[in-house]
Image: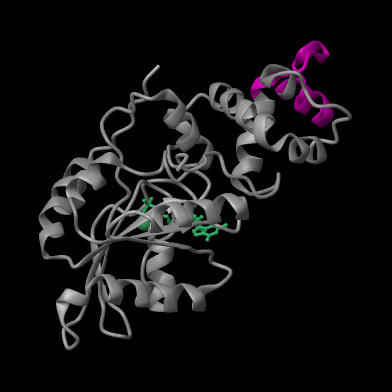
Amino acid sequence: MSLQWYPGHMTKARRELAERMPSQDVVIEVLDARLPTSSSNPVITELRGDKPVVRVLTKSDLADPEATKAWIDYFNGLPNVQAFASTTDRPQVTRKRISELCRDLAKHRGKDKAVRALIAGVPNVGKSTLVNTLMNRAVAKVSDKPAVTKEQQAVTLPDGMQLTDTPGLMWPKIEDERRAFRLAFAGSIPDTAIDYYQVGLFNAGVLLERYSALVMARYKLDKRPADPTAMLNEIGRRRGLLLKGGVIDPHKAAELLVHEFRAGMLGRITLEVPPAA
Ligand SMILES: Nc1nc2c(ncn2[C@@H]2O[C@H](COP(=O)(O)OP(=O)(O)OP(=O)(O)O)[C@@H](O)[C@H]2O)c(=O)[nH]1
Ligand SMILES: [Mg+2]
């Protein structure tokens, strides 16, 4: 199964991103710290070319700290890349580090000229939140639903840096269904475009493999479920998610798992590890 979700404004958003890119000194590529591979958009990679990039791993408060550290080390080992894990819990650190990293990567720009940086990423990863953090006030609309920003928005930061927020960008067809399932689990694809059961079932497998202790603690399970189907059934049983006749409803269990994961209620989880060195 491949997933198609490409709202109309994204065609324009892609064109405008391509138009804006050449004038920028640095790209601030925003990735979800819980799924840095799946939340990296190949269209943005292509449009960036070899321009310097700050990869910001957002929502690091929800991600596994060890995995985040591994990701940062991995990205920092790539040419023209600086990585930083952000969380809205520490806005001052974010302001300081982003400013330092952008300035460092844009050295060629000259000291007296304002750095121009473009923020890009898939929907709902926290691009506009980052703009607000850097501005230290709410200038961009933020929501927990994907595809909220529909137009580019240029702002000037207190230190003079010129920053452009852009609409979350997908590509017309996600061929790799594992990627689609992860993006949907994290909330980068709207609930109206996904099947909770499929998304929940796939990610139940990922959680069982790497975070079964967190799953067992959250849903008060005595033993590790044998497989993803059993896990959804156990969640349904523990939470009383039943169909008529008292049969467990695995679809409701999947929906619950999706929402509790997004809210960080299972604990700090990362779905993907960096490629082995
Ligand atoms: N827990 C947590 N949530 C965050 C963090 N940063 C952003 N969010 C939440 O992520 C959601 C999406 O934030 P936005 O800033 O609207 O995301 P966006 O990338 O601009 O989304 P689009 O404009 O739709 O592409 C909101 O509910 C934010 O509150 C973070 O560091 N931690
Ligand atoms: Mg936005």
Instruction: Name the chief secondary structure element in magenta.
Output: helix
Which residue is most to the top? 245
Residue 3: % across, % down: 37, 25
Q: Quadrant of the N terminus?
A: top left
Relative side of 211 to 124, left or right: right
Q: Quadrant of the C terminus?
A: top left
Which residue is most to the right? 222
Identify the residue at horizontal 47%, vertical 39% (top origin): 276
Residue 164: % across, % down: 25, 65
Residue 219: % across, % down: 80, 35
- Residue 275, compared with residue 226, is above or below; it is below
Is residue 238 visible to us here?
Answer: yes
Q: Nearer the viewer, residue 87 or 112?
A: 112
Q: Is residue 43 magenta?
A: no
- Residue 96, compared with residue 187, is above or below; it is below
Q: Is residue 248 magenta?
A: yes
Q: Nearer the viewer, residue 100 or 18?
A: 100
Relative side of 231 to 98, left or right: right
Identify the residue at horizontal 10%, vertical 55% (top origin): 19
Is residue 143 visible to us here?
Answer: no
Which residue is most to the front? 277
| Count of numbered marks | 0
Q: Quadrant of residue 61?
A: bottom right
Identify the residue at horizontal 31%, vertical 80% (top origin): 157
Relative side of 115 to 174, left or right: left
**Magenta-colored span:** 232-251
Residue 83: % across, % down: 41, 61
Identify the residue at horizontal 33%, vertical 28% (top origin): 174
Q: How is the image coloured?
A: one colour
Q: Nearer the viewer, residue 7 or 164?
A: 164
- Residue 123, compared with residue 203, is above or below; it is below
